[in-house]
Amino acid sequence: MSEAHIFHSTVLREYDIRGIVGTTLNPADALAVGRSFGTVVVRKGGKTVCVGYDGRLSSPALEEALVEGLMSTGLHVLRIGLGPTPMLYFATRDREAAAGIMITGSHNPPDYNGIKMMLGKGPVYGQQILDLGTLAAAADWEQGEGSSEKIDVQDEYVARLLKDYDGVRDLTVAWDSGNGASGEILRRLTAKLPGKHILLFDEIDGTFPNHHPDPTVEKNLVDLKKAVADHGCDLGIGFDGDGDRIGAIDHLGRVVWGDQLVAIYAADVLKSHPGATIIADVKASQALFDEIAKHGGVPLMWKTGHSLLKAKMAETGSPLAGEMSGHIFFADKWYGFDDALYCGVRLVGLVSKLGTTLAALRDGLPDMINTPETRFQTSEERKFAVVSEVKERLTAAGANVNDIDGVRVSTPDGWWLLRASNTQDVLVARAESFTHEGLERLKGALIEQLLASGLEAPSFEGGGTAH
């Protein structure tokens, strides 16, 4: 029997596996994940698993160890190589594999890495991830003689991305891969997509030399804004490190945030899915939920997390879901997983066929005064405890609290949110009001709760912007 393995206490997360390479995550951990997850797949009758990896410097070594672990359980491993996470999701569905695993650090700093998994057509999350740790601690692994082969799905993936493009006029679009894993696919995609395309930082480089690949942070969009202005683009589209989160810029250089994109997509999707449930996470603007209802849909607020939203989509039969963070999920024509490249194709097609601009679509949404999603540092051990303390105080005071994911507190001024990140050692805060004065009161209430838990108050960039 192989020796048991104990993961670092912070590595097994709510909806993926994540750690700092060389400190909390190593090839030995990837090997153990392969053995444990492979065991789960084999015991469910599975034979084949797809594996991919992103452009981080540590990813190839982790992938090698992961594949070794999977093969040790008797599985056949299809190695798709370097590319974005959604290409792994696509390959798993397209090849009808029993499961898929991606080595990726997503939008985290270069020294982070991690593992995302799917079993059948659904995500692996929550207790399923914790169970992998239980199997590893007991060395309760299946033994077998597996095998592996390298396959190339890039052309098939690009062809499928292009299939749903429905534009009728050519646009000029700037694209920013941020040196992430989408670069090669983006080159192949835009070579065949109608219109003129300007590509930024499409060379895959795990040191991210130009800017951090997180399109939810406005400072990371400076180069994209400049390209839109310099080339007279109709819009700009940016990706995170592994290509499952989208950011967008209109031709005026303004950010179109994730919840605004969902509202724009929802108005179109609801034309062919009248009365459908559209899901958004707890960080999304109230304006999004109101827009869904206005267009005849049923809005549903749910927990933040790509795995959690995908599972809720499957449960409700929703054709569209999205997060403030830019994870957007199409089940309308697509597979229900988050794919920023596909979302980009759908956005360009939508603007093209409507004969309008992204700016006009953005301006058609209600104006709310809100803060950006604000992250501030704490510790892995403390972040969940703070949220629990705040919830306890608010509940005792009779506040209107939605605790589906952290605490979202509604008042006559609007709402404020505090939740613990499942991917980083940070707390996430946001507030939204109808007025600047109301926003200040909401921020004050949030800061009061943080101080009561012994934390420093966050600095809200910009003090509130309309969107």
Image (cartoon, helix red, strand yellow):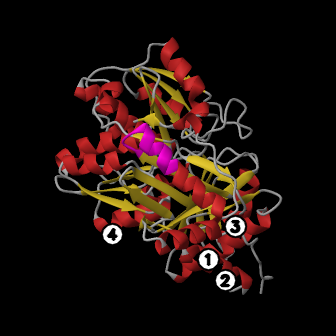
Residue ID at (47%, 72%): 395
Identify the image quadrant of residue 316: bottom left
Establish if 251 lies above or below 404. Answer: above
Looking at the image, which is closer to me, 219 or 43?
Answer: 219
Q: Are marks 2 and 3 in contact (CB under 8 Å)?
A: no
Determine the secondary structure under disc 2.
helix
- Which of the labelled discs sits on residue 315, or is there none? 4
Query: Crowding near pointer 3: few (<14 within 10 Å), some, many (20+)?
Result: few
Query: Crowding near pointer 1: few (<14 within 10 Å), some, many (20+)?
Result: some
- Which quadrant holds the N terminus? bottom right
Task: Mark 4 vs mark 3: give the one in front.
Answer: 3
Please provide percent x and percent y for residue 225: 53, 23
Task: Mark 1 vs mark 3: give the one in front.
Answer: 3
Q: Which residue is mark 3?
A: 382
**Magenta span covers which residues?**
433-443
Determine the secondary structure under disc 3.
helix
Determine the secondary structure under disc 1.
helix
Query: Crowding near pointer 4: few (<14 within 10 Å), some, many (20+)?
Result: few
Distance Cα–Cα, label 2 vs label 1: 7 Å
Residue ID at (21%, 53%): 297
Q: Which residue is mark 2?
A: 134
Residue 371 in sight in this render: yes
Is-magenta flag for residue 440? yes
Distance Cα–Cα, label 4 vs label 3: 32 Å
Determine the secondary structure under disc 4.
helix
- Which quadrant holds the C terminus? top left
Please provide percent x and percent y for residue 40: 57, 78
Task: Mark 2 vs mark 3: give the one in front.
Answer: 3
Q: Which residue is mark 1?
A: 130
In the displayed structure image, the side of residue 181 where residue 137 appears, left or right = right
**Which mark sits nearer the N-terminus, 4 or 3?**
4
